[in-house]
Each structure stands twice: as structure tokens, then as C-alpha cells.
Amino acid sequence: MPSCRLLPIAALSACCLAHAQSPVAVPAGQGQGGYDFAYRVAGDKRVAPVQVFDDGRQTYMQFRAGQVPPAIFSSGPEGDRLAPVSWEGGYAVVAGMAREFALRIGEVTASVRYQGRTLRGASMGTARQSESWGGEPAGRADFPVMQTARLPPDPQPAAAMAARMPVRAAQVYEATPADRNMRQALRRWAGLAGWTFDTEHWAVHVDIPLAGSASLGSDFKSAVRELLAATELSAHPLQPCFYSNRVLRVIAYAESCDRRAAETARQG
């Protein structure tokens, strides 16, 4: 498809500034010696990163050019938890570290497992003295080990336990340079929200490139509308169509979401 560039408007002005991405570089910080690359990637290459490493505080994942970024979960005894992810220099940056991550787009999955000798907790943000992923005691712990034996009895254990339970972060729909264009961003979002959006559902003949990043909230429909609103002042304004069978289509702004009405208008 030919591509077009949007005029920057409102909160999405950062999304549509250029076609090309700068080369990916290792994040600045501790230097090459301060990074741990002892991760093993397995599973479907469509969602698997090409490399994974950490700097002792957070985990970096690099994906192939044009690859749709998957949802990333930290895995532990209590199951998978959605990991908070930001983007830095072309890398998906996961806050904290874990012994294992699960990556998923719908039913397509991959896994990342830490195989080094540094302690990793059962979930992000913890470490256990009794476990090490190398068979020998690690030289450092990534996070302080909690000392609970000296704490006085809790007069309200049930309420305190509820207060300490982690709050699961709501899904936030973000458009990033890794998506390359609006069509791929919408395809990724639809997979996260349980909607269907395939190639034939992008019913226009242009691709809208993305070069910046924007966070568009946690509601799928609102995020889609806000993303496509950035095309209103362009040569190809677009609009979304949401159907009861959870199918999303993108059409020209002048067309109707009712296919029968659109067909009648064309025949007339």
C-alpha cells in the first residue's frame, strides 16, 4: 500500500512525524559489563523477541523490525501477571525482573526464561534466598529480601493482606514506532481486546506511518477512535466501524459502516 503522512494534531501529534526509525542501540547506563544476557527464548517466532537482557533493575526485550509487539506477562506460582512495559530506544522495557516471562498475541505464545546465576524472585520485584537459577548461590540479589520474622503480629491480618495485594494494572493501548503504522497498531490492540481485525478489515488503500509514541487509555473503542481522529485533517480521513460480532473495520470517513447502505449508494 502507498503511505501518507499526517499533520500533527492534539495529543497524537507525536505519532505521525516520520517513516524511518533510528538504529536500535543498547540502552545507555552501566555499560556492556553491567548487563545480563543469560535468557533463553522459546516458542513461536511471531511473538518471540530476538534478544533479552537486564541491567539489574529492569528487563529489555528487542523485537524484529515490523513485528507486532505482544502482551508481556511475568510468570510465577500465582500465575501470569501483565507486566508494565515502556519503550526506550527501540526496546520494550519491563519494570523489574522475573525468572520467566510469557509473551502472547491471542493463541500465539512464546516464553523467556532466565538461566543465569543471579537470584530471581517468583514474580517481579522479589527474590528468594533458597532458589538460584544456576545451582550455586548468587553474588547479589536484584531486590532486597523481605524480613518478616521480626514484625509484630498484625491486629487485622485479613485487612492488611488485602491492602498488600498487588493491584493488576489496566490494559493501556499505546501506539509506538514498533507498530510502524496504524494498521498494525490496531491489529495488535484488537488481539489484546479480543476483537477481530485482519488485513481485509483495513478497507482503505493507504497506510498511515507511526514514528512517535502515544498512550490512548484503557478502553479499546475510545483508543481506536482517538487514534483515527489524527487523520481528520489529512488527505485520507478515516473512521472505525465496530460490529456486534466484535469485528473492527476501518473505512474512509465519507463511507458508511452499514455495508448494505454503502453498496446501495455505489449502485445508485
Image (cartoon, rainbow, N blue to C red):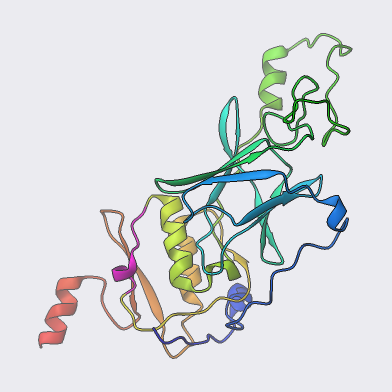
**151 lies above or below 11:** above
Position of residue 205 measured from the top left corner of the image (x, y, whole percent): 34, 83
Q: Is residue 142 above or below residue 231?
A: above
Residue 138 appears in view: yes
> Residue at 47% of width from left, 72% of height from top?
182
**Along the viewing direction, whichever of 68 and 218 lies nearer the viewer:** 68
Residue in the foreground of this view, choosing between 16 and 73: 73
The span picked out in magenta is 195-202
Nearer-the-camera pick, 245 or 44:
44
Q: Residue at x 46, y 86 (%)?
A: 3
- Report the quarter where the N terminus lies: bottom left
Q: Is residue 215 above or below residue 36?
A: below
The x, y position of residue 139, in whole percent, is: 88, 32
Q: Is residue 20 left or right of residue 247?
A: right
Q: Position of residue 67 (x, y in %)?
A: 51, 64
Number of numbered discs: 0
Give residue 97's quadrant in the image.
Answer: top right
